[in-house]
Image (spheres, rainbow, N blue to C red):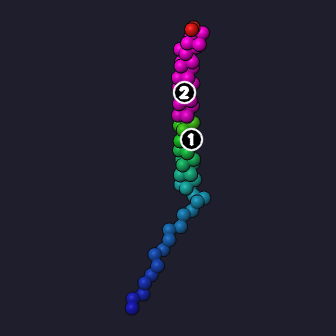
């Protein structure tokens, strides 16, 4: 039989400046993604309000004239 060796694991130093830089970049990307999502929802809500108000404004004369 042959002697099999287990592969060594690479250890990551989470306290290193490189790792901290990657974490900061990841958190910044997450903040940007969250801001994009909230702004997209707000933009869609604004257009829904505009659409409903336009429908109501054009429909009110139908209730006053008969």
Out of 35 and 5, give the one closest to the viewer.
Answer: 35
Q: Residue at x 53, y 41 (%)?
A: 33
Total numbered badges shown on the rendered structure: 2
Cα–Cα span, label 2 and label 1: 21 Å
29 is higher (above) or lower (below) than 54 = below
Tell me the SS state at disc 1: helix
Label the magenta part by its dominant secondary structure. helix
Quarter of the figure with the N terminus:
bottom left
Image quarter in which the C terminus is found = top right
Magenta span has 30? no
Q: Which residue is mark 1?
A: 34
Is any atom of residue 59 visible in this view?
A: yes
- Taking depth in this image into account, of 60 and 12 the one nearest to the observer is 60
In this view, the residue farthest toward the front is 66
Q: Residue at x 53, y 14 (%)?
A: 58
Asked if the stretch drawn in magenta spans residue 53, the answer is yes
> Tag 2's secondary structure?
helix
Residue 4 place in picture, x, y as percent? 43, 84
**Viewer-nearest residue: 43 or 2:** 43
The magenta segment: 39-64
Which of discs 2 and 1 lies nearer the camera? The answer is 2
Residue placed most toward the observer, 41 or 33: 41
Looking at the picture, how far across and down is residue 21, in whole percent? 55, 50
Spot the residue most to the top. Answer: 65
The disc label shown at residue 48, or none = 2
Name the residue: 54% across, 63% down.
12
């Amino acid at each position: 039989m042959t002697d099999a060796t287990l592969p060594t694991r690479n250890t990551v130093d989470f306290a290193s400046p490189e790792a901290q830089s990657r974490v900061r970049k990841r958190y910044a990307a997450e903040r940007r993604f969250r801001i994009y999502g909230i702004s997209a929802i707000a933009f869609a809500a604004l257009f829904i309000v505009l659409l409903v108000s336009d429908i109501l404004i054009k429909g009110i004369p139908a209730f006053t004239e008969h």
